[in-house]
Amino acid sequence: MIVISQAAPLLSLAAISHLELLHKLYGYVLVPPAVSLQIVWAGGEEEGSPGEILDLAWIETRQPSNEPLAIALGAYLPDEEAEALALAVDLNADWLLLDDPRARALARRFKLPFLGLLGVLVAARRAGHVGALAPLLDDLRAGADRPGGGLAIDDALYRRVLAAVDEAPSGAPDGGAEGHGRP
């Protein structure tokens, strides 16, 4: 399986100590050089820093071979998303992990399958790799004010994600989820 990621899903999963979910779900993850740089910039040299993500044997940095496509996409997107999309096109990726709305729109135009961080967490829950999602979502929300440390998740999206796995929100015994949406 070929899975390519932008930095945000990797950094956010590392921030909540669940980066291994990507390895459990997909085995191997590729990142383009611009993503590697962003991860290095987000991290420091201390143990447990985001920079250590790139030391994992199952994460590999790979240059897109279609440089003109990466450059063209760079007119619409930051380098990390442009390179991730170009690499996904090059390798006909099975999954592209990204959360940026503009990058997702372009992924749709290239007919590339993609998941965001919340979609990865739903897949991990359905595969039995995590118990309750609510504590993970709470941790992501708590870290949303730190760079690379979390994700802004509004209440409606929070409820939709939990409803997708038939889970009640934290502290709500009746579930209270409204509607069913796809994260």
Image (cartoon, helix red, strand yellow):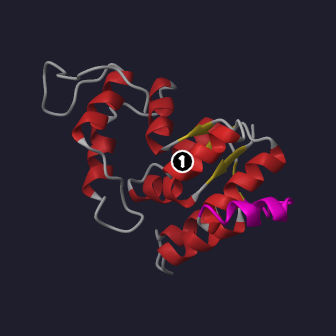
- Above-or-below relation of 158 to 52: above
**Left or right: 123 with respect to 169?**
right
Residue 148 magenta-highlighted: no
Q: Is residue 27 above or below residue 145?
A: above
**Which span of residues is magenta-colored?**
61-77
Question: Residue at the spot x=42%, y=64% of the render?
Answer: 148
Could you tell me which residue is drawn at 66 percent across and 69 percent down?
34
Instruction: Name the residue nearer the viewer: 89 or 18.
Output: 89
- Do we see residue 176 in this rendering? yes
Image quadrant of residue 115? top right
Query: Callout 1, which amino acid?
Result: Glu
As drawn, which residue projects farthest toward the bottom?
45
| Quadrant in the picture for residue 6 | bottom right
Q: Is residue 68 magenta?
A: yes
As helix, strand or loop, the secondary structure at mark 1 comes to helix
Would you call the spot at circle 1 few (<14 residues within 10 Å), some (14-19), or many (20 or more)?
Answer: some
Looking at the rendered structure, the number of numbered marks drawn on it comes to 1
Give how far across and how far down residue 69 sits, in percent.
Answer: 79, 59
Q: Could you tell me residue 145's position as x and y percent? A: 28, 64
Tell me the quadrant of the picture where the C terminus can be found: top left
Along the viewing direction, whichever of 46 and 13 lies nearer the viewer: 13
Q: Residue at x 63, y 47 (%)?
A: 106
Location of mark 1 (residue): 20
Q: Quadrant of the N terminus?
A: top right
- Residue 99 visible within the image: no
In the image, residue 68 lies at what x, y percent? 83, 64
Residue for point 46% across, 52% down: 13
